[in-house]
Image (cartoon, rainbow, N blue to C red):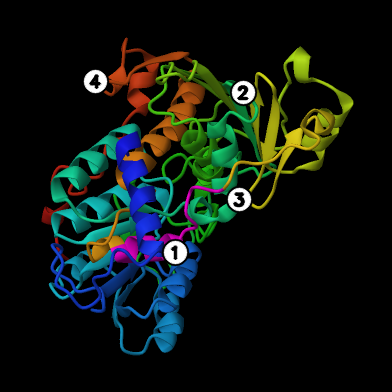
Amino acid sequence: MSKTTRRQFLKASSLAACGLLAGTGRRLSSGYALNEKLQLAVIGIAGRGAGNLGALAGLDESIVALCDVDQRHLGRVGEEFPKARRYQDFRRVLDDGDIDAVVVSTPDHTHAIITLSALRAGKHVYCEKPLAHTAEEVLTVQRVAREAKRATQMGTQIHAEANYRRVVELVQSGAIGAVREAHCWVGKNWGGGERPKETPPVPEYLDYDLWLGPAPGRPYHPIYLPGNWRRWWDFGGGTLADMGCHYLDLPFWALELGEPATIAARGSTPHPETASEWLIAEWEFPARGKSPPCKLVWYDSGKRPELPEAHDNPEVRAEIERWGNGVLFVGERGLLLADYGKHRLLPAASFEGFQAPDPHIPDSIGHHKEWIQACKGQGTTLCNFDYSGTLSLAVILGNVAYRSGERLEWDSVRHRLKSPNEATRFLSTPARPGWELSAPRQLQRR
């Protein structure tokens, strides 16, 4: 999302908080009245899907369709939403003309195909992170979303929490001075492993072919699902794809980053099947307006930042070690350390008596509610596919750099590598016949 659009959103949110965007009951340009219930479908109803269902259930909208490849989930969740129609095949959901908006909570490798199908069917879309599985998919989803002019939101729920907003205000107010580097780390790991040799039968309750979707065919094995798919390149992108959009979101927002200029990464010896057992990825961004060029570094699996000599002292080092997950902004006048729920200015002695700027980013009405209201034509979403697609693209390019072993130079105008090299083959993956991005609505019905 452009800076102008994001600032317009914040202004509109402020007006709404003051009661200046009255409109309940009037017909909006989107075709809905604000007091009219949306007809919602949730595709993927376990894991993150269950979380999304819980959030939506409290918003007094109509959940009219549930979809999952696992009949056990449909049976269990269907009891909680007895009026909702049940589907195993997402394409049947999108054939339903009564549905206004779709929530996509499936594994990464099916995000794009379902999201594109929904947008082309005229639905508003909320999609879990990352927005897609490959760079090509992200760029295609962004383009189609702009053409469709539907309300979109990616599931970076922490973006709506107050702590992130206070951190953004501190950075953008100049509390720590100009920021030339930022570091993000998490303790989690989704990597390693070998393809199993056993070929157990597919459970009767599971439509495994639909679960594979566009991914290359392979025999079923319970090692892949429900959650372990994240470590396999055909389905996920390891720890970076799982957590990057949450933690990198904060520096992307605070520093107003766009597409990177260069990307490099290193980790354990690359494996053709599974993600790295540890990863350090680095992106370089050009100057933005008055902001200087910036370096952003990612660490997972217990790795930690190496601090610049000017800021490397026992207090700072102890804080970094104490926080299992964190984001560190390195400014000319000090450091800002943050995670989901808290933040600290360091070193403490340098900020004694510091007064934080008055909050000016309005509190969110809720990540899911932002999207619901945008579906009805009131305001927009901070994590729409323009903003969140660019964030997802950076995450994916980090994995591309690691898998290729190349330092990538990225053309942010043409959205491609400046010089084709070994990395090119990791920017997209061939889809199984019938699952191509160009024509997802023509998938063969069974």
394 is higher (above) or lower (below) than 74: above
User: Residue 42: in sight, yes or no?
Assistant: yes
- Say the numbered circle drawn on residue 365: 1
Q: Which residue in the protein does label 3 denote?
A: 163
- Say which amino acid is labelled 1: Ile
- Say which amino acid is labelled 4: Arg
Q: Which residue in the protein does label 2 denote?
A: 177
Q: Marks 2 and 1, Cα distance to the nearest angstrom?
A: 31 Å
Q: Residue at x 68, y 33 (%)?
A: 336
Asked which secondary structure carries label 3, the reply is helix
Q: Marks 2 and 4, Cα distance to the nearest angstrom?
A: 32 Å
Q: Is disc 2 surrounded by few (<14), some (14 to 19) or many (20+) residues within 10 Å?
A: some
Q: Residue at x 35, y 58 (%)?
A: 15
Q: Marks 3 and 4, Cα distance to the nearest angstrom?
A: 35 Å
Asked which secondary structure carries label 1, the reply is loop
Mark in front: 3 vs 4 = 3
- Rendering quarter of residue 127: bottom left
Q: Marks 1 and 3, Cα distance to the nearest angstrom?
A: 14 Å
- The magenta region covers 359-373
